[in-house]
Image (cartoon, grey):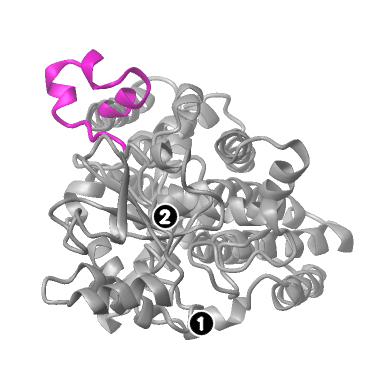
Amino acid sequence: MLFVIVRLPWDGDLGMHAATVQRLRHRLLDPGNPLVDANTPSPYYSPWTVFLGVVARLTGLSVWVVLRIGALIGLALLVTGLWRYVRTLSDRRLAPPLAFLCVVFLWGTKVFNWSGFLGLNSLALTVAYPSVFALGLAFHFWALLTRGLKGEPAGWAVFLGLGALWAVILLSHQFTGVVATLGALATVVGARAGGRALPRLGAGMLLGVVLLAVWPYYNFFALFRVGGLEAIHRSLYQHLFVRFCLVLVGVAALVVRVRRDRRDPLALFLLLGVVVFAVGALSGHYSWGRVLPAVLIPAQIAAAVEVAGAARGALRNAAAGVLAPALAVGAWTQAQTVGYVVGRGALPGAVAAKYRVPWSGYHWITPWVRYGDVVMAKTYPARQIPAYGAYTVAPGYPDFFLPDDGRREAAVETYFGAGASRSARLRMLRSYGVRWVVQRPSDGGLPPGDRVLRRVAVGARGDVLYEVVR
């Protein structure tokens, strides 16, 4: 993973997070929309990205160096947090390192990549995302909460600190915040928290809610009214067996734990996750599928803890005999992750066939396109161009805080649409102050010979950068 951070493969939402840090380094207190030239709030302005923006502003380092620093911090939090949490569940020395293997390899026979999911391949692509930082904090949060509830409850300051930590997780990555909340609820129920702990838990929760309410960069509670996420997340309910079948080893371990303690926190954690996931399927709220880590993580950790804690002899050999092949299958399934370090050419044929080449980026436009320039581009380049400081006409990702999102999408469709007139296309360029156009010959738009366009550069994928001549 350290070598992956050096290479920092680009895929998915990395451009969004880079653009967010770009805006914060230029205008820390009022950054505006990260993708388009509009003064709107954004849920991407979290405590974590604000911290990275401050680092970029104070050091003068490039956004890509700052993202690598953030990835190192997030990975360190994840490693130390998982270690500390597992130590609250088992005192066996083997448990924490075995938990690492289970969390990254005990998945399925088909690679699944999504932020907030800790399979090795997914982690390699998202290590610089806020979700990794939030998950690392979540493990520390559960460990601190478990220790705070053992025996005599910890002091008021500890629970107030936990409330603040809970708020930071929710603000930094809302889906991971839900997972962290379910894990905390399972911990409290499993610990059989007494009367002295409950007022302190309530005070911590109240402080967390206050911090959520006063966060200045966006209205956290407005996210509950956001819709339109269901189509994107429908795939979370598909191909479940091939994606997660190896986790059944952990489910079997949880059955053993429940037979010992009906309030086992890992079992309760998984149960809460299953309930929310199932309700999402039944109600059509497919975005609730992002709670899946609340199902996977407790099962993965349970597998490690039970094998590490099994008595020596036949019982441990049997447990290891089940877990070891499952880990081997999981490792083979995700072997292509090595390609993000060595490149496809160094991979054996069978592994190279599974490897997906990362995005190449649009750094080639930076000698001409300046910070704050507006670029007309389709969705794929629009997900990358703002990472270099420019704006696009329409955001490459859904933006529910942008009131004219639909109008901007229509403007892009008009410009590139096959039936649009030249005057309509020119009107779209002028309406949004477009200075540059990025398009392929097959994209449509104004023809290359139009007097309004001046060809400037060509990218490796065949994209052409045109300057809009005033």
Marker count (numbered): 2
Q: Is residue 132 above or below residue 269?
A: above
Say which amino acid is labelled 1: Phe
Image quadrant containing the C terminus = bottom left
At a point 38% along the width and 64% down the height, the residue shown is 397
Name the residue carrying label 1: 224
Helix, strand or loop under label 1? helix
Q: Is residue 235 above or below residue 358?
A: below
Say which amino acid is labelled 2: Pro
Q: Residues within 10 Å of mark 2 (few under 14, many from 20)?
A: many
Q: Report which quarter residue 194 is drawn in.
A: bottom right
Question: Closest to the observer: 329 or 87?
Answer: 329
Let me know if residue 350 is in the magenta part.
yes
Is 75 situated left or right of 359 in this image? right
Q: Is residue 445 above or below residue 370?
A: below
At a point 47% along the width and 48% down the height, the residue shown is 369
Image position, residue 54 (x, y; %): 74, 48
At a point 63% along the width and 74% down the height, the residue shown is 218
Which region of the structure is painted magenta?
Answer: 336-358
Q: Report which quarter residue 203 is drawn in.
A: bottom right
Image position, residue 272 (x, y; %): 44, 67
Name the residue carrying label 2: 293
